[in-house]
Amino acid sequence: MTDDTSKPHNHSLLEDVQGILFGSTMAGLGIVILTHLGLVTGQTAGLAVLISYVTGWSFGAVFFVLNLPFYWLGYSRMGLRFTIKTFIAVALLSVLTKFLATQISFDTLTPWTGAVIFGMIIGSGLLALFRHGASLGGVGILALYLQDKTGFRAGYTQLCFDACVFAAALFVLPLMSVIWSLLGALVINLVIAINHRKDWYVAT
């Protein structure tokens, strides 16, 4: 006799909606904390944050535009369902970061505490998106595409990109802000590395 509870099952539409909304909201809250402290992060979001610091443009608008070139790669590599969900998640994050910034203020938030909380919140948001077949687009999609085409490991591509983002941040932010930013990025990666395992979560 087999245990049906161990078999993968598809998420319902309602489950996908709440999962993507939760993930995008958590990511948006994390970005509000990040930008309040004047920190930066990796991946496409980090590049968008840096551009917003330098130009004064809205993070949400910059992030949305930066992701546009990657959707075709997402469709080619992951399919239409993933691409649509990712587009929705990116659009939600772009809107929510602006909205949440008008709803939340901080009297006291130290950089190291904010970096850790930011990492935890962003990590939980990304986990929710991954588990509902979505992402926040950008470099992660490119990394998977290059891995398919060239064999160059996706993780190395993302690591190289993040190194470039943090190197550029040294010309924009104080050194200690970059150090606290690295702490936040470390927490994000730990949350995902420890919790994102297919054998622990079998729904799709």
Image (cartoon, helix red, strand yellow):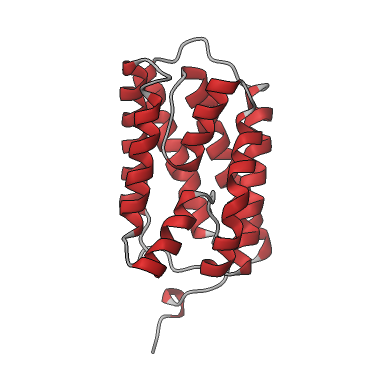
Residue 136: image location, x then y, percent: 54, 48
Position of 189 relative to 148 (above/below): above
User: Which residue shows up at 52% across the image and 19% down it?
Assistant: 36
Nearer to the camera, 14 or 100: 100
Relative placement, left or right, of 92 versus 153 is right
In the rendered image, which quarter is residue 29 located in?
top right
Relative placement, left or right, of 55 versus 197 is right
User: Which residue shows up at 31% across the image and 37% down it?
Assistant: 186
Relative placement, left or right, of 22 versus 112 is right
Residue 59: image location, x then y, percent: 60, 30
Report whether residue 96 is seen.
yes
Residue 75: image location, x then y, percent: 59, 66
Q: Which residue is most to the top?
A: 107
Report whether residue 15 is seen.
no
User: Which residue shows up at 48% across the image and 26% down it?
Assistant: 34
Relative placement, left or right, of 17 versus 76 is right
